[in-house]
Amino acid sequence: MRQLDIYKIADEAKLNPFHGLVLFWCSLIIIFDGYDLAVAGIAMPAIMKDMGVNSTQAGFMASSALFGMMFGAIFLGTLADRVGRRWVISICIVLFSVFTAAAGLTQDPVVFGVMRFLAGLGIGGVMPNIVAEMTEYAPRRMRATLVTLMFSGYSVGGILAAFLGKAMLVNFGWQSVFYAALAPIVLVPFIFMSLPESMSFLHQAGRFDELKAIVARLDRTYSPSATDHFVLPERDRSGKAPVHHLFSEKRSFSTIMLWLASFMCLFMVYALSTWLTKLMASAGYNLGSAMTFVMVLNLGAMIGAVGGGWLADRFNIKYVLIFMYLLAALSITLLGRPLPLELLFVVVGLAGASTIGTQIVNNAFVGQFYPAAARSTGLGWALGVGRGGAIIAPILIGVLVGMSLPLEMNFVAIAIPGLLAAIAISLVNSKLSAAISNSSISSEVRDDIVMEKGSA
């Protein structure tokens, strides 16, 4: 009888078409997800004019999706560790596709907000599950690169929304860009059939034939046998609720720090997304339409995500994150200084790379920190708590803008969370990371955990 460690097989697997399939579907789903989130911001000026709403009402309409994302990330991320990722991912795609399209059918601000809230459940719920999926199957030596490459699809979705907005809003009305969000629904059956289920879920459910088929695709040299016995680390065999893993094995403080970092990073992301155009216009810069800002920010985010992932696979991901958060604080602060137009575009790109891009690298770090049995839960809670920053940022910075403070002070207020996030990440005990504790180089960490359990 052979005893096979399924995570060791995944960690040491050579890159092959199976990994390409997982990367393709996860990236495509994230592109759809990014489009659905960005589309409301692209169309909001036309929506305000058509529905006759003021800026306060428009703010509520825009933030309703963020509330949905907060609940979706927490509850649907946790649900996936109980019923399987494929089901939850498929449900999320249906939610954000159907209800984004439904928002285009309404002329009532309240109904629009409800539709966006329901769409937000899917938008927020799919993120932790897709990151967990890519993290589980990516080889260890290039895990951060593949996760951040996949998640850069989020920025592609934002750019796609900007391009379609330019092409369709004038000719077909704001509703058209919402109707386009229904397209992914036709892919749900193919995604459900093609996307592999979580190995830890299959193991716990006793679906060993499916597990053997996945292992054979991960490792082309593996030949399934009826006597094969798959093993998981003890933490992944636990029958306790997945949320328990977030605070077990000395992870409590680090979990709180990861939540704080996500909160601060999403604060910066949504503060910039909401107020950058207004602040720069007040500074006297003529940078063209808001579409240009969306594209520059998202292009910078793609470079930051992929570049950050590449660095994280070659250096300690914790220190890469600290550097990126400090870069965010510096670049955002520089936005408040008088700069030549060309240099300003560079700094805006850096701000996108070190805020949106850093959040993507942060997701990769969170995904590696927790054991597979609680990976979706850990990501879901980190993103869910982080959504609090996304909700608060537009309101708080809006109050500061209304106080007519000097331009530099507004950007300093947006930059301070970058420093706080860097401090939070520096306090995370990366020795407790599941990715490290499952490896052969950290036997002393595993011994400490075993001793702690034995004395409990």
Image (tube, rainbow, N blue to C red):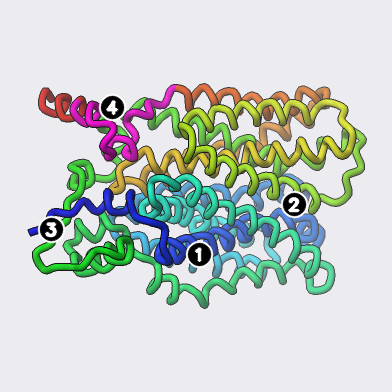
The answer to whether residue 375 of the structure is visible from this angle is yes
Asked if 313 appears above or below 95 in the picture, the reply is: above
Under circle 2, the secondary element is helix
Residue 246 appears left or right of 114? left
- Residue type at mark 3 is His
Marks 4 and 1, the one that precedes in the sequence: 1
Which quarter of the rendered picture does the N terminus lie within?
A: bottom left
Q: Vertically, is 174 above or below 389?
A: below
Decide whether residue 428 is among the magenta residues: yes
Question: Is residue 204 highlighted in magenta?
Answer: no
Q: Of the numbered discs in the image, which one, if any, rests on residue 295?
A: 2
Quadrant in which the C terminus appears: top left
**Magenta residues: mostly which secondary structure?**
helix
Label 1, on which residue?
24
The residue under label 4 is which amino acid type? Lys
Kind of residue at badge 1: Phe
Q: CA distance from mark 1 to mark 3?
A: 30 Å
Query: What are the residue bounds of the magenta stretch?
Result: 427-447
Residue annotated with mark 3: 229
Q: Secondary structure at mark 4?
A: loop
What's the CA distance linking mark 2 and mark 4? 42 Å
Labelled pair 2, 3 in contact (Cβ < 8 Å): no
> Disc 2 or disc 3, which is closer to the eye?
3
Place of residue 255 in the rendered image (x, y in percent of width and height, measured from the top left): 38, 32
